[in-house]
Each structure stands twice: as structure tokens, then as C-alpha cells.
């Protein structure tokens, strides 16, 4: 027969063995989990590295664009770094909006008596309309959302833009600046003023976090190229009068011929 001491020793040995075996299983499970996690990370990294170089470059440039746009949005709200000059920046932003430009162009077109000035204002109105349509078409096609820190104000709430690419203010500023430089401005000081205005309007969209850097850059390039199209399709006042008279004459001819084809019944 075994003594009570030997039985106690044997029970202790069994308990220690059970504890050691459980700890060994725990270590093995932990090592297997760490192995799987490290393997998963390696697999994700290999998938990212296996992407085409164009995709990697595009994502890198997109990350730089997001980072730089966030750093430039120093007037996004009153609590921002440059929030104290936010009203001034908003005033510069409003100077590039399409509504005052269309109203001012139509008013000048109706008030001017010189044929040359009317012709210039007419083509400026057509250029603004073309810019508005092209920017809207590209925005609808790309559908890029505005930055997250963009804050709508009472004034801008009536002109809320759902999409960000490209910047309509930047394209309009570049197109109008080139239009004025080619058709109206004839002094060096005015040229500097016009170019500075276009640059400030484009910069205001970044300071207020309305757009990304690529939105403004593409908008400037788009507006610069739009004037080339406007200049190629320049509408003269004589040509417009001929077209209007031709349309009016055709309308009178159709109305006159319709009178003879009516079956008059007494």
C-alpha cells in the first residue's frame, strides 16, 4: 500500500504536468496566431506591391494631393489657423463666382453703345456660358466629393456644389484673365492686377478647403484652353446680325406661306 505522502506527491506531479501541458498548448496557439498574423501582413504587402506601377504612382500622388490640400485649408472655419481673415478670403472667392460675372456681362452688353464693346461683351457672355457647361459636364462625369473640412456658409449655402473636380472658380478665373489680357487690358499694371486676381481666386478655394489642389490645377488648365476655343469661334456683331435677320426672314416666310395654305371658310 502506498503512503499518504506518496499519494500527495503523485497528485502534485499530475497537476504540474497538466499545467505544463496547458501552458505549452497556449504557447503553441500564440505562436500560431502570431505566425498567421505575420503571414497575413506579408500577403497584404505582396498584394500592394504586385499592383501596376501606374496604380501605385496614382495612389501616391493622390495621397500627396490630400495631404497638401489639408495643410492649405487654413481658413476652413473660424477656429482654423488663419480663421481671422476668412471673411476677406470669402470676398475674393465671391469675386470669381459665375452669378456676378453673368449679371455684369449682360448689364454691360445692354448699356454699351459701341459696337466693338458690345461684341466683346457678347463673346464674354458666350465664354462664361461655355465654361459653366463644360465644368458641369466634367463634374458630373468624375463625381469627386468635396473635401471633408469644407464648411458651407450662409452665402455659399445657395450655391452648394456636390462635386469638386474641377474647380469652376479656377477655370473661370483663368479664362476671364486670358480674355481680358487679349481683348481689353493694354497696360502692364493692369496685366499684373488681372493675373493676381486670377491667382488669388484660385488660392481662395484652397484656403477655404472648397477644393483639392488637383481640382484647382486642372481648372486653371481647363480655363486657359477654353479661351483658345472662344477665340477660334469668335462671333462678330455683323455675323450675329446676319444670323438674326436670316432667322427672322425665315420665320416671316413660314408665317406668310401659312396664310395662303389656310382653308378660309366663309
Image (cartoon, rainbow, N blue to C red):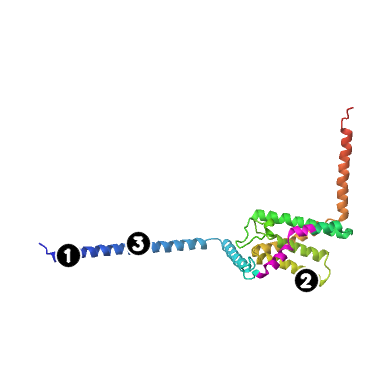
Give the residue at the far bottom of this rendering: 189
The residue singled out by tag 1 in the image is 8
Kindly state the secondary structure of the residue where label 1 is placed: helix
| Quadrant of the image occupied by residue 113 | bottom right
| Of 172 and 33, the residue lying toward us | 172
State the quadrant of the N terminus.
bottom left
Q: Viewed as shown, does residue 105 lie left or right of 156?
A: right
The residue singled out by tag 2 in the image is 192
Q: Label 3: few (<14), some or many (≥20) within 10 Å?
A: few
Q: CA distance from mark 1 to mark 2?
A: 99 Å
Question: Which portion, as a residue range, is magenta?
Answer: 84-103
Kindly state the secondary structure of the residue where label 2 is placed: helix
Q: Nearer the viewer, mark 1 or mark 2?
A: 1
Q: Nearer the viewer, mark 3 or mark 1?
A: 1
Q: Residue at x 65, y 54 (%)?
A: 141
Q: Earlier in the sequence, mark 2 or mark 3?
A: 3
Q: Nearer the viewer, mark 2 or mark 3?
A: 2
Kindly state the secondary structure of the residue where label 3 is placed: helix
Q: Earlier in the sequence, mark 1 or mark 2?
A: 1
Q: CA distance from mark 2 to mark 3?
A: 72 Å
Q: Residue at x 87, y 43 (%)?
A: 250
The residue singled out by tag 3 in the image is 29
Q: Viewed as shown, does residue 236 lie left or right of 224?
A: right
State the quadrant of the C terminus.
top right
Magenta: main secondary structure: helix
| Quadrant of the image occupied by residue 9 | bottom left
Q: Viewed as shown, does residue 185 lie left or right of 51?
A: right
| Residue 53 position within the rendered picture, expressed as x and y whole percent measured from the top left | 57, 63
Q: Viewed as shown, does residue 8 lie left or right of 210?
A: left
Look at the numbered discs 2 and 3 and tell me whether their residues touch, using CB distance below 8 Å.
no
Amino acid at each position: 500500500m502506498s503512503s499518504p505522502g506518496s499519494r500527495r506527491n503523485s497528485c502534485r506531479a499530475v497537476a504540474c504536468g497538466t499545467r505544463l501541458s496547458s501552458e505549452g498548448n497556449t504557447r503553441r496557439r500564440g505562436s500560431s496566431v502570431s505566425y498567421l498574423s505575420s503571414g497575413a501582413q506579408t500577403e497584404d504587402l505582396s498584394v500592394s506591391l504586385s499592383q501596376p506601377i501606374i496604380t501605385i504612382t496614382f495612389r501616391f500622388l493622390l495621397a500627396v494631393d490630400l495631404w497638401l490640400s489639408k495643410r492649405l485649408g487654413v481658413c476652413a472655419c473660424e477656429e482654423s489657423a488663419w480663421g481671422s481673415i476668412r471673411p476677406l478670403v470669402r470676398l475674393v472667392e465671391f469675386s470669381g463666382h459665375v452669378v456676378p460675372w453673368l449679371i455684369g456681362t449682360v448689364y454691360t452688353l445692354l448699356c454699351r453703345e459701341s459696337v466693338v464693346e458690345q461684341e466683346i461683351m457678347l463673346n464674354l457672355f458666350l465664354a462664361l456660358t461655355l465654361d459653366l457647361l463644360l465644368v458641369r459636364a466634367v463634374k458630373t462625369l468624375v463625381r469627386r466629393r468635396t473635401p471633408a473640412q469644407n464648411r458651407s456658409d450662409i452665402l455659399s449655402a445657395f450655391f452648394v456644389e456636390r462635386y469638386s473636380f474641377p474647380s469652376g472658380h479656377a477655370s473661370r478665373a483663368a479664362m476671364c484673365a486670358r480674355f481680358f489680357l487679349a481683348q481689353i487690358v493694354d497696360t502692364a499694371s493692369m496685366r499684373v492686377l488681372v493675373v493676381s486676381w486670377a491667382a488669388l481666386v484660385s488660392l481662395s478655394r484652397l484656403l477655404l478647403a472648397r477644393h483639392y489642389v488637383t481640382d484647382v490645377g486642372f481648372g486653371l488648365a481647363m480655363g486657359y484652353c477654353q479661351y483658345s476655343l472662344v477665340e477660334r469661334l469668335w462671333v462678330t456683331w455683323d455675323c450675329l446680325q446676319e444670323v438674326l435677320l436670316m432667322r427672322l426672314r425665315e420665320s416671316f416666310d413660314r408665317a406668310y406661306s401659312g396664310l395662303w395654305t389656310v382653308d378660309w371658310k366663309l
